[in-house]
């Protein structure tokens, strides 16, 4: 009983956000511990169902690097990485397709559906959803970059209250399959759908400057921090794909820690949030969010 005022305050705080986002589209890049830890997988599925039940359109794009490596090991294939990206020859492309478009994709959809979420598992080969070209780094084999998102299938599913769960495999003009980075695929899909939000769910708290978590940052500042060597390593491609999404018409990009239980709900429906939001212009978006 002592928690009733706190619970009531939480619900009241969430109401303006629920009203603002009803009918909007969120694209969520799903990866990291939230995909691996059984408890986090369940709370992620619950969060997704809650978001759809209050009228938000959800598209999920997922990775699966750990599962690909584990399956390749069992098949006697060596995983090789070039600048942090998986070298993908023909044999490894078969593993990527088998893992991402197969078990991983269907497990995610099934977890959401256990909570009445109405999810549908897809990959970029379905209806040529993701057309791709070879990556600029020719040393990566069949690694591709998204050339076009043919979003008609996604729009059809969203209009009928389904949740598309997309494995990032692309199809080339010569019908070659490509392994596509999930961050880049999510950015391209969010741009094609003119999404309200692109949300990266991973194993980092957000953008850190020293020991400080930055809750809101405009893209120009993020790019300055990369130039100054403050943002480094794996955060750089995330920032670059976030900026590409903002250029493509996405309203905001969020980077949140999927190791936190109910991270999605905390970021979307509380004033402080738990991660970093990146905005297209230098405004105090935390203050303007629900005005």
Image: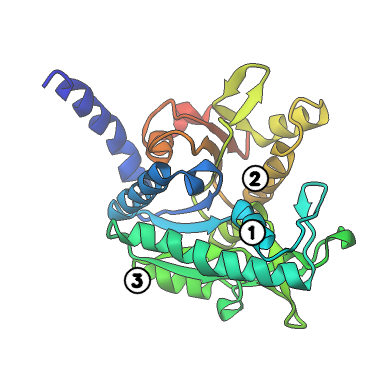
Q: What x and y, as percent, mark residue 67?
A: 59, 56
Contact (Cβ within 8 Å) of mark 1 with mark 2: no
Q: Which residue: 88% across, 62% down?
A: 138
Q: What x and y, as percent, mark residue 39?
A: 38, 42
Tell which circle, 1 or 2, labels the residue nearer the N-terminal end: 1
Instruction: Name the secondary structure under disc 1.
Output: helix
Instruction: Name the secondary structure under disc 3.
Output: loop
Number of numbered discs present?
Answer: 3
Q: Which of the 4 image quarters holds residue 282?
A: top right
- Up the image or down, 262 lies above or below 36; here it is above
Q: Which residue: 82% across, 47% down?
A: 83
What is the C-alpha distance between the residues marked 3 and 2?
28 Å
Tell which circle, 3 or 2, labels the residue nearer the N-terminal end: 3
Residue labelled with disc 1: 68
Left or right, 10 with reference to 93? left
Q: Which residue: 77% across, 83% down?
A: 174
Left or right, 88 with reference to 261? right
Q: Residues within 10 Å of mark 2 (few under 14, many from 20)?
A: many
Q: Which residue: 32% across, 60% down?
A: 117
What is the C-alpha distance between the residues marked 3 and 1?
32 Å
Q: What x and y, as percent, mark residue 91?
A: 75, 71
Q: Is residue 132 visible?
A: no
Q: Nearer the viewer, mark 1 or mark 2?
A: 1
What is the C-alpha distance between the residues marked 1 and 2?
25 Å
Q: Residues within 10 Å of mark 1 (few under 14, many from 20)?
A: many
Left or right, 178 with reference to 104? right
Instruction: Name the secondary structure under disc 2.
Output: helix
View extreme (left): residue: 1
Residue labelled with disc 2: 242
Residue labelled with disc 3: 160
Q: Nearer the viewer, mark 3 or mark 1?
A: 1
Q: What x and y, as percent, mark residue 137?
A: 87, 58
């Amino acid at each position: 009983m002592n928690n009733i005022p706190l619970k009531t305050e939480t619900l009241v705080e969430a109401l303006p956000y629920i009203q603002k986002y009803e009918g909007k589209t969120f694209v969520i890049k799903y990866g990291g511990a939230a995909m691996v830890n059984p408890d986090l997988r369940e709370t992620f599925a619950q969060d997704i169902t809650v978001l759809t039940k209050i009228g938000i359109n959800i598209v999920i794009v997922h990775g699966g690097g750990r599962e690909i490596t584990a399956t390749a090991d069992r098949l006697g294939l060596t995983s090789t990485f070039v600048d942090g990206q998986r070298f993908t020859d023909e044999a490894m492309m078969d593993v990527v397709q088998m893992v991402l478009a197969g078990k991983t994709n269907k497990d995610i959809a099934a977890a959401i559906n256990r909570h009445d979420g109405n999810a549908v598992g897809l990959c970029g080969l379905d209806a040529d959803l993701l057309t791709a070209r070879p990556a600029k780094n020719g040393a990566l084999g069949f690694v591709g970059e998204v050339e076009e998102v043919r979003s008609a299938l996604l729009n059809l599913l969203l209009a009928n209250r389904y949740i598309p769960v997309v494995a990032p495999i692309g199809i080339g003009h010569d019908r070659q399959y490509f392994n596509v980075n999930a961050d880049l695929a999510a950015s391209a899909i969010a741009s094609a759908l003119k999404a309200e939000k692109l949300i990266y769910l991973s194993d980092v708290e957000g953008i850190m400057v020293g020991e400080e978590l930055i809750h809101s940052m405009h893209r120009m500042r993020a790019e300055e921090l990369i130039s100054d060597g403050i943002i480094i390593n794996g955060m750089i491609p995330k920032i670059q794909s976030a900026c590409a999404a903002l250029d493509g018409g996405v309203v905001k990009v969020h980077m949140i820690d999927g190791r936190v239980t109910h991270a999605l709900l905390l970021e979307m429906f509380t004033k402080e949030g738990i991660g970093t939001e990146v905005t297209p212009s230098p405004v105090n978006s935390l203050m303007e969010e629900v005005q």
